Image (cartoon, rainbow, N blue to C red):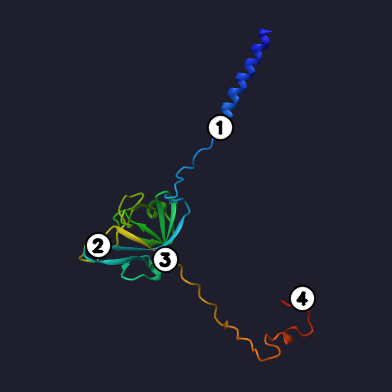
Amino acid sequence: MDQAKTRVGARGLGGLVLAVIILGACKARPIPDSSPLLQFGGQVRLRHLYTDDTQETEAHLEIRADGTVVGTAHRSPESLLELKALKPGVIQILGIKTSRFLCQRPDGTLYGSLHFDPEVCSFQELLLEDGYNIYRSEALGLPLRLPPQDPAPWGPARFLPLPGVPPAPPEPPGILAPEPPDVGSSDPLSMVGLLQGRSPSYAS
């Protein structure tokens, strides 16, 4: 009798231990970096990176077709950039019009490359309280700055991401808008000639 009770108790204890192990394995865990304030990989934003300084210099970062990076006073198709998150706090910057990635050399010089190299084309994004951001090369740790205009020093490192919209696709040539229907005609939609001899069910 005592042996039977011992066996039942051992089985009950073993079942309890097994249940604890299963519950521990199935316990829901939070998603790493699940805060909506953090940037998930793959997040894409279209922005113009605007910068200014105490000398009232205003410029938008522009990636040109030849790979040069300059500051332009006004927004342009070359200044519309795609900021894509690679991981939380790290982004890549792509010129929409030129399809060139923003990259940085060891001396701090910026250039546009047709090929993405994570060693030189990945930037850390630090959000400031005033809405401006600071970007640094992830590998080099150098701040992203516009090239200097001699004899002026290097430009400021703060950038304000301004919302941008993608350029409208060009309209295909040779397509004219349809003429308005002739409301005084007995066939204002010109259906008689098109459907003559054919069933409307098979009209394309």
The residue identified by callout 2 is 53
Tell me which amino acid carries mark 4: Ser
Tell me which amino acid carries mark 1: Ala
For mark 4, give the secondary structure. Answer: helix
Q: Please tell me whether residue 199 is drawn above or below residue 139 in the rendered image.
A: below
Tell me which amino acid carries mark 2: Asp
Circles 1 and 2: CB distance less than 8 Å?
no
Whether residue 65 is visible, yes or no, is no
Residue at point 21%, 65% (across, down) = 55
CA neighbours of label 4 inside 10 A, class few (<14), some (14 to 19), many (20+): few
Look at discs 2 and 4 and give the one toward the viewer.
4
For mark 2, give the secondary structure. Answer: loop
Cα separation between marks 3 and 2: 22 Å
Cα separation between marks 3 and 1: 46 Å
The residue identified by callout 3 is 164
> Quarter of the image holding residue 188?
bottom right
